[in-house]
Amino acid sequence: MDVDPPGPPESPPEVVPSSTGLKRLQEDAPEDAASTSKCQKPDEPQEVDEGKPKAEEGGEAGEASTPGEKGKRKEREKERKSGGRNKRQRGKKGEEKDFVRNRRRGTRPEGEEAPAENGESKAPRLPKRQCALLIGFCGDGFNGMQIQPDPKTRTIEGVLFDALIKVGAVSKDNSDNPTKVKLGRAARTDAGVHAAGNVVSMKLINIIPGVPDLVSRINKELPPEIRLWSILRVQNSFNARTTCDSRKYTYFFPSYLMIPPKPGSGLSNTLKAQGTECPAHPFWEDVNNEQQATAQDDLQRKRTPPHLLEEMYGPRQIFIPKMPALGLLLEYPIFESYSKRVAGVNEKLQTDDPEYRPIIDFEVHRAQLDEFKQNYIYSKMRSIEDQFGIFDGWVRSIDAYAGHDLEYLNPKGVIPASAVIKRGEYRNNPFREKKRFDATSFPAGTSGVNALTIEEEESSEDEETLPLDKEELADLEG
């Protein structure tokens, strides 16, 4: 076997220490030739040559660090500090990832018992579902619809929330704050205002062991003035206020409000002075007079034509007195858009499917609504009007007014310049509304508004609103 003769010895390659291998050379150097940096105290800063890049901390000595490697090291450092992830979570895309789910503090999986407290263990956690509660109520004796922080303030939602806690539809963990269950309402009503239908949305325990009929069970805990019509499972994004399209209201008032102002009253004299007085109404004329008015005229108290309504919404600002709050009734909120959306989804589902969501329709409970309105709302309105004369006092305050603010109530259907309100301009004898007409209920033991009280109140307003000029006053009084 032929062997090549050895060639001349090659000179060893010249080793030039790189900047990244500086650390390795220093470690291999003998102790007497060690760098002065080893002798420095830990607290003293080491001198580093700014012209040479420093090896990345945590990397292998003598290896160059690329920007990609720096980024990976930073990610590993963050993961090490967080300590909340499993290494398998960083596997390649498509591989199974094993990671730990972090639950919020104070929550536990459904059906799991909580640890014992004071020797007593909590009941298993029942699942909550987003639901819509269809309710109706008589607002008399309540301080409005919305729940208040003060537990002494009696509200519709406050009484309803307490009933839900008693039956177990709201857990004890969530009983201290309604925001934990995302409580909301479709329409907020003021104190004393009634609603035949309203919607409350919240996360509810809708399946309770041992309670086959949850609606009936809740109604037993509610006063008769508040009724729960049904509980509907809704989409998780459902919000009673923002999902609601519109709200239907009805206003009730006694028919005697259609009688025109009495001849000689302040408003009648004002219209007469402006040359826009309305013709005499049969109610104020002699019974033997054969003149009669049509049914349409009877529905127009001062013979004001309907086209005036469009002009009242125009750019010119006029004063419109508020009607008494006693006659206001919320019929029900309307969720037309939501109902159409879920109806399209339900076409492919059966009614027993967990994903099935019923539409929100109060007409399903029409018989219950009508009975409730007759027994608790209409009868209450009549009782308060008979006892306190709210509408009677209100219409008298309108007729007693002798200023210019209501001069647009005339049979010509025109808004005179004297009735237009201009910003920053002083108004002589402005109409003053009385707060008592905003009330819909009165404390027990309050006496009715007798005729003397009404006359004294009207006389006081006459003194405030009548012009100070004696000649004009005499002319208005006829």
Image: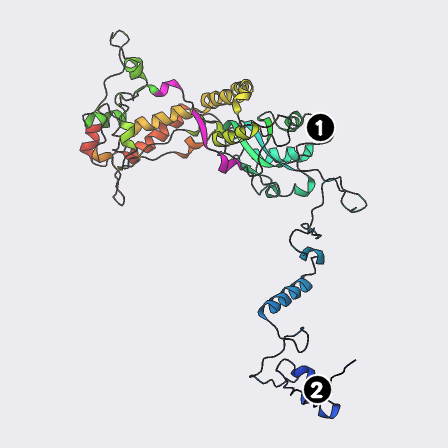
Residue 422 percent coordinates (x, y): 25, 41
Q: Is residue 431 left or right of residue 274?
A: right
**Could one spot residue 141 in this view of the protein?**
no
Determine the secondary structure under disc 2.
helix
Q: For the residues marked 1 and 2, what is the alpha-carbon distance in whole angstroms?
A: 78 Å
Residue 211 marker: 1
Q: Secondary structure at mark 1?
A: loop
Magenta residues? 239-257
At a point 18% along the width and 32% down the height, the residue shown is 471
Residue type indicated by callout 2: Lys
Q: Position of residue 309 (x, y in %)?
A: 29, 28
Q: Residues within 10 Å of mark 1 (few under 14, many from 20)?
A: few
In the foreground, 21 or 395 = 21
Q: Amino acid at mark 1?
A: Val
Is residue 194 inside the magenta stretch?
Answer: no
Q: Is residue 463 left or right of residue 125?
A: left
Q: Nearer the viewer, mark 1 or mark 2?
A: 2
Residue 23 image point, x, y percent: 67, 82
Measured along the vertical axis of the image, is residue 55 above or below residue 126?
A: below
Give the label on residue 359, or none. none
Q: Is residue 284 left or right of residue 323?
A: left
Tell me the quarter of the image containing the N terminus. bottom right
- 111 vs 106: above or below: above
Would residue 437 be found to the left or right of residue 317 on screen? right
**Depth check, front residue: 344 or 267:** 344
